[in-house]
Amino acid sequence: MIRNCLATIVYSATYFALVFGLAGTDRRVHAQTFDQIGGTFVPFTFSGDQAAASQFDALGPGFGTRDDFATAYDNFSFAGTLSVVEVDWVGEFFDDDYLLFDLPDFQLQFHADSPTGPNGSEPGALLKSYDFTQFQVNATPLADNFVSYSVDLASDPFGVTGGTEYWISVVADVDVDQNEWGLAYSDSGPDGDDFSVQDFDLDLVGPRDRFYDTPDFALSITAVPEPGSLAILLVSGSMMVLRRRKRTL
C-alpha cells in the first residue's frame, strides 16, 4: 500500500513537471537533424561554380534595384512531427574583396511542396518567413571566402509534419556593387537527394527563370519534438519504469 502510494506520488510529480515546462530544457536531447553538410564543410563544384546566387540585389548605378534577383531552394523532410529550432548553412562571397564586417542580413523562408516541375516537386506556397539582421546570425569565416552561418528559431519554431516534403530558401541582402553572395553547393551529408532549385533573373527586367539542378546545398536543419509530444513520451516512459518497479516490490 505504502509503495503504491509512493509510486503514485512519483508519477504525479513527473507529470506536473512536464506539464509546467520543466521537460522543455531536455528537448534538444531528442533533436533530429536533416544534414546536407556532413560535419566539416567540403566545397563542391557544379557547372564551374561552388555556390548558386541567392540575394536581394541592387543592380548598381543606372539599373535600379531588383529585390528578388536570385533565390536558392532545397527540399527536406522529417519522419516525425517536429519543430525546427535551428538552421545552419554555408555561403560564398563571389568577390575576392570580401570583408567580415560586410556580413549581410538574411531572409529565411519555408515553403510547401508543389507537385509540379520536371521531378514532380518544386517550391510552392510560402508557409513562414524570417528576417534576420547580421547581428542575429552567427557567422564563422571559412577558407576561400566561404562563411558558415547559424540562426536560432527556438523562440518561434517552424512546425513540420512527419513524412511531408518542405522547401527552404536562404537569401542574403547584398548590394551587387558591394559583393555577390551564393548558397554553397554540397555533395556531403547523409540526407542529400541531388535535387535543388534556383530562381534567377537572367535579363534583369522580366520574370525570373527557374532552374532545376542536381547538386544539394550546404544546409543543416535541426528539429525537436513538440512540447506536448515530448511530455507524453516522457510520462509514458516514467509509467513503464514505475510498473517495472511495482512488479519487483
Image (spheres, grey):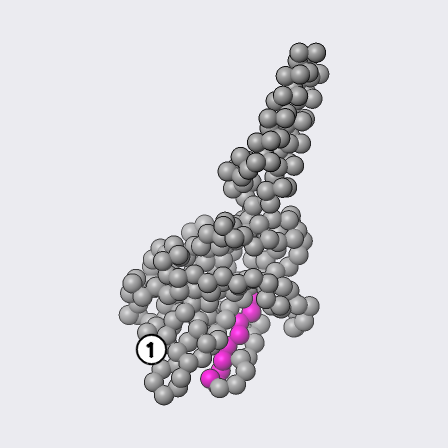
Q: Is residue 205 above or below residue 88?
A: below
Residue at 36% in and 58% down: 135
Picture quarter containing residue 228? Answer: top right
| Amino acid on which the number 1 mark rests in the picture | Asp
Q: Would residue 195 be counted in the magenta stretch? A: yes
Picture quarter containing residue 53? Answer: bottom left
Left or right position of 71 against 166: left
Residue at 61% in and 60% down: 166
Picture quarter containing residue 66? Answer: bottom left
Residue 232 in percent (x, y) is at 65, 36
Which image quarter is the C terminus in?
top right
Instruction: Give the labeled residue for mark 1.
Output: 177
Residue at 64% in and 59% down: 165
Closer to the camera in the image, 89 or 193? 89
Closer to the camera in the image, 214 or 152? 152
Residue 197 in percent (x, y) is at 56, 69
Residue 152 in percent (x, y) is at 46, 52
Residue 218 visible from this viewpoint: yes
- Secondary structure under the numbered disc 1 in the rendered image: loop
Residue 188 visible from this viewpoint: no
Left or right position of 195 against 44: right
Q: Is residue 223 above or below residue 146?
A: above
Q: Is residue 180 above or below residue 135?
A: below
Left or right position of 42 against 79: left
Residue at 39% in and 81% down: 59
Q: Which residues are magenta?
A: 194-204
Q: Would residue 98 be counted in the magenta stretch? A: no
Residue 124 in percent (x, y) is at 62, 68
